[in-house]
Each structure stands twice: as structure tokens, then as C-alpha cells.
């Protein structure tokens, strides 16, 4: 069906901001093809008007165990209503872009579910969904870029430009997302106070005081791991085992100084305010960049994530401002189809940051107006950490276990994680903004059900919270449950986290502890090896006591190897007395059923 009106609606569900960045990019590209475009957060869109939309692009990430992002939940609940007729969206043509990580079992699950449901309601897919994979060498762009090229080709056939009208050239400059207003003094805007205290959330974080920042690995160990304690005081924050705390990091003084060297045209002390150039464009949270005004230095410290790895769209926009012939030629080469391998070798492989790229292209950077920096450089996104403490045992504090990210590439300076490095350098007494979000792990309530936990490295964090919750609880039932912990690290003396606590509980018979110290003997031993050693015990727990299994930690190989150890236990290879023989197929089916019943839950990260 030919549609005369060339209106495009871009709806996004984003947990950390990546899907929002992509949605805004699609919005900019739509302007080039002369569409009237709106880019809106899914839960901000009046979903009852969805049947009226003829052309929609959905962008969504997947969180946790295949769940939709928080700002998509209301929208998704509406789409799942059983009273919606199958002809609800007959007038709609749509595309879905999913952002995920293939190291997770339910890769891009939210996008796949959304695509399927839209089809059930009668909408017509322009293309199969794009399934971006953060694990790919080229990151999400490896799937997103070719999908978008194909999408726009098909779209222009379905929604052609009016006769005589041509698309804008690829180097056209779209309007900036925000308008910038200079403020002469701090008193030029009225600051209104309020007695209303909204609940703690991403829009209203609690500024918690760090009471302890303790290195818990030995001085000679290669990695710095921190146990950081926050005072909650009278914040009203509560949490349960498996919940996560969201932390908003900042750039260091050193990196900020480098940033202002790249942009000599910026006055770091100039006071500014922002205005949206479109009614649906949200301003940054007031606690990051106050509506009453902020300095350029505030932006560099709290908002611009110039330590992230740039995507192709960054080079496209930077090229539009470049007046230096050599730099512009190289930037355009990077964004061409033929230049993708060169871009990968320059940027993705060595993990070159945006700030380092801007240093290399400093003549082009000097031409970027300040208002376009909000389009060029993404916002710093909050980071999630599993809570390692128990609210039951100490409701006035919250603890996290943080592995400080640092590694070498071919670049001379080591690569460092923005948030973990920032946290590791904070002294007690410093306040930082945080809020708590429900986690994906759901522990059983029946005290008769055993719980098996597999948590190598910092993956033990949610299990420390749960073990303390159970064993130090005043409720007798919590102390009756059988708890099994498989913990792994490199060395007993270097990185055996919470060893005193767990060894004491093991000695008291209140915790079954099995440790794998991978480097304490010639042959490397990991948690999956300890599980295979105890396969008869695991078989009994899984089959006869219907135990729950929880796995947390690095997503690379460990989850698959742990799952294989569970298969081995189910197949009962040592021939213990069991009426039923277990084949590989039967073990696979049983594990799949465990996942459906939430008896096998994974929380992994890359």
C-alpha cells in the first residue's frame, strides 16, 4: 500500500542509553530523506495511538535474563493485552533493531519478542530484525550498518520522495539536538527549591558517602579489586539479594585537561544552559546538568563520555565539520564501505578512545561548535554492580566488589575502565550518586529447596548478599536451607574474596563450600572441574531435591562450561544407583526445563 504521508516514528527502549543513541542516529538519517520524524522513548509514547502509525522503527536493548528495558515495560505490557485484535496494526510497516550481547543466553530476546508480537497484531515487517551483537569485532555496527543501508533502500521504494525532490547529500548537517544559551552569572536564572522529595531513582539518585574503599587482593596480585562500602543512612533505600546498584561515573581531572586541549575554543568556566530543539527530545537529568545552569567543565566531567570507543556515526559527523583536507579525506575513508577494516584496525582492535581520536584529528575537532558536541559525544552511562552486602544484616550500608579494569593493547597507554578506575581512586568521605534497581536473580522462597551458587571472581557478589541474608537472618527457616557455593579465583592467598566469612560458615556446617584456585597447582582448576568432581551430589540435588542453580560472572566461556558440568551431573556417568538412565538429549531437555522454571538462572557480563 502506498502511503502519501512521509511520517516516521522512532521508538526506543534503552537501559543504559545505547539504544537511545541509535534511535537518534536513525532520526538524523530520516531527515536526510525528507521524512517528518519523531524520536520518542517507548513508555513516553501514548501507545493507544500506535494503530494510527504507518511507519515505525523500534530500537530496543535486552537486559538481564532476556527482559525488556525499564522504559519499555509499560509499552510492552500494553502490546501483550489479550483483548487486542490481531488486526490492530494492519496499517503499520515497521522495522526492529535489537541491541544485545551474544555471550548472554537470551541474546536479543526483547527485540525478537517485539518483532513476533508486532507481526501477530497485523503489522508488516520491512525487513527481518537487525540483531546487533556487542561481542562482534566491529561491535553493534557490524549488524546495524548494513541493515540500515538495506532499510533505507526499501523504505524509499515504499515511501518515495515527491516528484522533483532529492535526498540531501550524505554530508548534510542535521540540526543539533540541543540549543546552547550562555549565562552571564549564576544569579541570572532563578533557582526554585522544593520540599517534595521524590523516590530514589535514576532521575533522583541518592548521594551516598563512601565509608570504606578497601583493596581486597594482595599487593602482588596483578588485579586491583575493591570492596567499597556506601553509607545509606536515612535514605530509605532497601534492596534484596540479586539486586544491583547503579553508579554514575565521572571523568578524571587528567582526562578533562586533555579534552580542553583538544577543544581550545571552549571556555571551561563558561556557564551554559540547554534547550531542546524538538519537543520530544529530553534534556539530561537535572542532577547531572542542572536546568539552572552549568559550566562547560561540568559537561566534561559529568556528561560527555569521551573515553568511550567511537562508532562510525562519530566519524561521519566529525567529517562534516572538518576543513582540513587530509583529515577530512581520512574520516570519509573510515565511514566508507571499503574503509571498514581500516576503521576496525585503527579504532576497535586497539580500543582507541574518542578522546584519542579527537587528538589525532585535532584540526577537525577545533571546528566543532559546542552545541554539536552533544551529538558527537554520547552521554556517560550509569554502570550496574551486583550488591555484595545484606540489607537484613545491615540496612544502613551497601557494598560492591569492583574489579578495576586495566589491560594493554598496541597503544602505549593501558586501557582503563572509566567507572572502575574512578571508583578505585575515591577516598572515604566522598559522596557519589547511586540508585538501586531490581536484579534478574530470583531466589526460591521455600526453605526446603537447596540453592547451588557458582560465582568465580567478582561473580560471587550476589551470593555473598544471599548467603549473609540467609545465614545471619533471625528467621529460623532461612538457616535451614542447604547452601552450596562453588567459588573460583587464581590463588588462595591473592584473591580469595570473603574467605574468612565463608570458611567460618563452612566450619559451622552452615555452608557447603567448594573452591577452585586455578593457579595454585600445575594444572589449572576451575569451578566446572569442582562441579564434575561432585557430580553425584549435584545429581541428587538437581533430580531428587529439585535444587535451584545460580551462575554469575564473566560471560566468555564460564557459563557454557558450568552448564556442561550440570549435564555431566545429570547423566550420572559414574553409574550411581538410579532407576532411569540419562542420555545427553534427556539432560539437555532437563536443563531447558530448569531454565523455563527459573531453576537455572545466569547473570553474566562481558
Image (tube, helix red, strand yellow):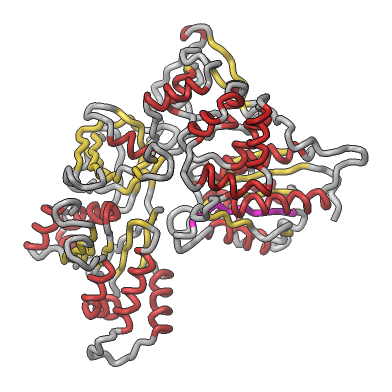
Residue beneath the point at 20% across and 52% down: 495
Q: Where is residue 263 drawn, in percent x and y?
A: 53, 21
Residue 245: % across, % down: 34, 43
Q: Name the residue nearer the viewer: 452 or 411.
A: 411
Counting every numbered tag in the picture gives 0
In-image side of 94 versus 272 (left or right): right
Q: Residue at x 41, y 32 (%)?
A: 204
- Above or below, 37 against 146 in this view is above
Verify whether residue 95 appears in magenta: yes
Range of the magenta residues?
A: 93-101
Seen as rendered, the residue at the extreme right is 163
Is 55 on the left or on the right of 335, as rendered? right
In the picture, the quarter occupied by the N terminus is bottom right
Q: Quadrant of residue 415?
A: top left
Rendered location of residue 265, percent (x, y):
55, 16
- Residue at image point 45% right, 27% down: 288
Query: Does the segment drawn in magenta span residue 114?
Result: no
In the rendered image, the residue lying farthest to the bottom is 579
Above or below residue 304? Residue 457 is below
Residue at 29% x, 50% y: name it. 240
Q: Is residue 266 left or right of residue 244?
A: right
Of residues 239 and 410, the one drawn nearer to the viewer in this rendering:
410
Kindly tell me whether residue 80 is visible in this rendering: no
Nearer to me, 571 or 396: 571
Q: Can residue 450 be seen by looking at this rendering?
A: yes
Percent from the top left, x then y, of residue 508? 7, 62
Amino acid at each position: 500500500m502506498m502511503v502519501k504521508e512521509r511520517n516516521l516514528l522512532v521508538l526506543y527502549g534503552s537501559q543504559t542509553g545505547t539504544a537511545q543513541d541509535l534511535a537518534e542516529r536513525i532520526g538524523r538519517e530520516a531527515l536526510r530523506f525528507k521524512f517528518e520524524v519523531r524520536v520518542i522513548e517507548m513508555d513516553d509514547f501514548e501507545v493507544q495511538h500506535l494503530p494510527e502509525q504507518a511507519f515505525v522503527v523500534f530500537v530496543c536493548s535486552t537486559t538481564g535474563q532476556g527482559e525488556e528495558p525499564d522504559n519499555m515495560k509499560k509499552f510492552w505490557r500494553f502490546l501483550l493485552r489479550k483483548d487486542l485484535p490481531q488486526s490492530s496494526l494492519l496499517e503499520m510497516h515497521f522495522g526492529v533493531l535489537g541491541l544485545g550481547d551474544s555471550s548472554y543466553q537470551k541474546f536479543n530476546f526483547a527485540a525478537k519478542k517485539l518483532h513476533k508480537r508486532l507481526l501477530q497484531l497485523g503489522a508488516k515487517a520491512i525487513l527481518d530484525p537487525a540483531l546487533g551483537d556487542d561481542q562482534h569485532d566491529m561491535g553493534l555496527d557490524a549488524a546495524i550498518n548494513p541493515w540500515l543501508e538495506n532499510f533505507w533502500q526499501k523504505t524509499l521504494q515504499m515511501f518515495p520522495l515527491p516528484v522533483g525532490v532529492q535526498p540531501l547529500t550524505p554530508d548534510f548537517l542535521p540540526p543539533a539536538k540541543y540549543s546552547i544559551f550562555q549565562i552571564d552569572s549564576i544569579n541570572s536564572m532563578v533557582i526554585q527549591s522544593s520540599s517534595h522529595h521524590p523516590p530514589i531513582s535514576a532521575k533522583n539518585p541518592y548521594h551516598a558517602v563512601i565509608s570504606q574503599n578497601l583493596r581486597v587482593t594482595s599487593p602482588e596480585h596483578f588485579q586491583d579489586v575493591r570492596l567499597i562500602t556506601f553509607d545509606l543512612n536515612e535514605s530509605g533505600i532497601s534492596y534484596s539479594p540479586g539486586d544491583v546498584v547503579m553508579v554514575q561515573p565521572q571523568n578524571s581531572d587528567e582526562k578533562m585537561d586533555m579534552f580542553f586541549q583538544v577543544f581550545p575554543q571552549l571556555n571551561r568556566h563558561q556557564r551554559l544552559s540547554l534547550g531542546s530543539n524538538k519537543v520530544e527530545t529530553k534534556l539530561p537529568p537535572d542532577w547531572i546538568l542542572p536546568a539552572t545552569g552549568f559550566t562547560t567543565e561540568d559537561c566534561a566531567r559529568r556528561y560527555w563520555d569521551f573515553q568511550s570507543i567511537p562508532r562510525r556515526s562519530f566519524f561521519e559527523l566529525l567529517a562534516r565539520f572538518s576543513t582540513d583536507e587530509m583529515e577530512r579525506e581520512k574520516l570519509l575513508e573510515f565511514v566508507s564501505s571499503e574503509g571498514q577494516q581500516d576503521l576496525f584496525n585503527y579504532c576497535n582492535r586497539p580500543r582507541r578512545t574518542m578522546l584519542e581520536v579527537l587528538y589525532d584529528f585535532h584540526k577537525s575537532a577545533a571546528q566543532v561548535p559546542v552545541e554539536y558536541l552533544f551529538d558527537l559525544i554520547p552521554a556517560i552511562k550509569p554502570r550496574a554492580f551486583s550488591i555484595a552486602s545484606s540489607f537484613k544484616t545491615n540496612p544502613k550500608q551497601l557494598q560492591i566488589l569492583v574489579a578495576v579494569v586495566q589491560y594493554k593493547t598496541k597503544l602505549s597507554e593501558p586501557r582503563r575502565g572509566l567507572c572502575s578506575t574512578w571508583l578505585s581512586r575515591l577516598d572515604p568521605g566522598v559522596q557519589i550518586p547511586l540508585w538501586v534497581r531490581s536484579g534478574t536473580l530470583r531466589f526460591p522462597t521455600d526453605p526446603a529447596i537447596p540453592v547451588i551458587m557458582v560465582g568465580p571472581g567478582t561473580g560471587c557478589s550476589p551470593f555473598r548478599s544471599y548467603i549473609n541474608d540467609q545465614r545471619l537472618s533471625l528467621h529460623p527457616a532461612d538457616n535451614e536451607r542447604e547452601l552450596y557455593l562453588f567459588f573460583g579465583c587464581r590463588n588462595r592467598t591473592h584473591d580469595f574474596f570473603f574467605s574468612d566469612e565463608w570458611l567460618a560458615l563452612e566450619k559451622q556446617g552452615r555452608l557447603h563450600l567448594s573452591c577452585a584456585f586455578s593457579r595454585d597447582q600445575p594444572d589449572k582448576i576451575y569451578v566446572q572441574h569442582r562441579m564434575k568432581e561432585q557430580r553425584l551430589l549435584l545429581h541428587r540435588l538437581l533430580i531428587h531435591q529439585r535444587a535451584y542453580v545460580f551462575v554469575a560472572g564473566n560471560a566468555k566461556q564460564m557459563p557454557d562450561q558450568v552448564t556442561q558440568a550440570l549435564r555431566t551431573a545429570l547423566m550420572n556417568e559414574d553409574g550411581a544407583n538410579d532407576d532411569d538412565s540419562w542420555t545427553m538429549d534427556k539432560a539437555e531437555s532437563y536443563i531447558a526445563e530448569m531454565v523455563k522454571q527459573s531453576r537455572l538462572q545466569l547473570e553474566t557480563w562481558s
